[in-house]
Amino acid sequence: MKKKLLALSIMAILIFVFTGCNPLGKYIKKDMKVSEEEKSHKPWTVMVYVAADINKDLAELLIEEVKSVLAVGSGKNVHIVTQIDFPGKKKTAERYYVYKDVLARRAELEKVNMGDPATLESFLNWGMSYKADKYALLIMGKGTGWISMDQFQNKRSFAYSDSDNDSISMQEMKSVFSRVLRGKKFDTIAFNSGFMNQIEVAYQLRKYAKYMIAAETDMPGIGFEYSVFLQGLKDIDLEVPDFARRVFLSGGAKHKFMVRRANDILKEIKEHKYDNWDDDYHYVPEIHEKICKQIRSSSYQIAMMDLSKIDEFAQQLKTFVDSMVEYKKENLEDFEYSIRFAKDHSSCFASLFKEANGKKEYVDLNDFLMELYNRINDVDRLDILRDTVEKLYNVVVDKYYDG
């Protein structure tokens, strides 16, 4: 029994082969009639956009996340709807109304490119037809923040579709949100995608969402504990800040669980307790020891941002940058040294391109500003910098960091 449990635990954390059939097939009901519940006005509608036409290992992780959503399903306080794409050009995307353990299919879409902004726009128009007082958008897929994987385009990208070699840029997203929302805002937007917790991304979203939850690092197999925060929403008509905070807290909780399980598995491997595992799992130590070590040692950061505070911060940041431009004119050598020092001593994330040779493209803004604070001697500029950091803290409601 123990060897079975251990093997199943590993399967719950790590990736196995992606079968050729729909991995959610047992949950799908193709001809389920639309119920009165679906037609009713509810406090919340949660829309889940699953761009899983990516490599099969990552796609399998996203499917596990969808199963976490299925563990709860819609209820009296919330509509949960989703559109899911799968790897491969021949795969169709499908739309579902989510009940507990049931995906009630509401549309089958042929040859859909989830990286096309028109696809996102169509999904949002459909999702928001489920009437509610408050709306949340959860985006699952591959993200690269404000740098696109396509170096020849000035794009900030998410929702990659590998089969179509496409993704949604931040500029495209803004256009979609402007047409769909018509001056309104999503109450919460959360990215189950790497590298999206950036001031540049938050600034683009400020007119279209109240709160943003995203990771500054990658999210390899981590994501959110959907069943936890959705169950809370199903039970209680949560206020917007409470819901956003629960989404955020679930990200840290999921990471802690992943690290704890990785440590447990490494201990089992070290103590050779896998010797009597079934033949089906004899390869586990060789394959997964490295992965477990990566999970245990990887940096992970996720934050909740109040987008109503972004404009105030952006104005203060501009004031600070203007002051540094003057500082550069006054003392070029010290300016250049201070900038290099601050960057070299700040946390950095992502190495998206082969040409980078391991160099990280993204620098943690808070670290950078604090390192500058320790380098600059000019009193007036220190005051401006202090105000800038305080305004940044107003934006970042809460954050979880490990590593």
Image (cartoon, rainbow, N blue to C red):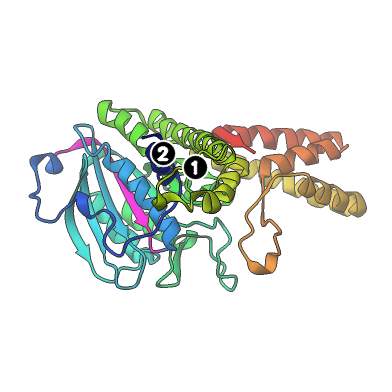
Residue that mark 1 sits on: 274
How far across and how far down the image is residue 192, in percent? 44, 48
Question: Which of the 4 image quadrants contains residue 267?
Answer: top right
Q: Residue at x 78, y 44 (%)?
A: 345
Q: Is the magenta stretch mostly helix, strand or loop?
A: strand
Tell me which label, 1 or 2, sits earlier in the chain. 2
- Which residue is at the front of the view, 289 or 196? 289
- Asked if the residue at tag 2 contacts the one at tag 1, i.e. Cβ–Cβ closer than 8 Å, the answer is yes
Highlighted magenta segment, given as a residue range: 40-53
Report the disc number at residue 3.
2
How far across and how far down the image is residue 65, in percent? 37, 46
Q: Residue at x 51, y 52 (%)?
A: 204
- Which residue is at the front of the view, 63 or 74? 63
Q: Is residue 49 magenta?
A: yes
- Which residue is at the front of the view, 116 or 108? 108
How far across and how far down the image is residue 160, in percent? 44, 63
Above or below 85: residue 73: above
Query: Which residue type carries mark 2?
Result: Lys
Query: Which residue type carries mark 1?
Result: Tyr
How far across and how far down the image is residue 74, in percent? 22, 38
Q: Distance between the residues labelled 1 and 2?
A: 7 Å
Q: Quick check: 173 left or right of 375? A: left
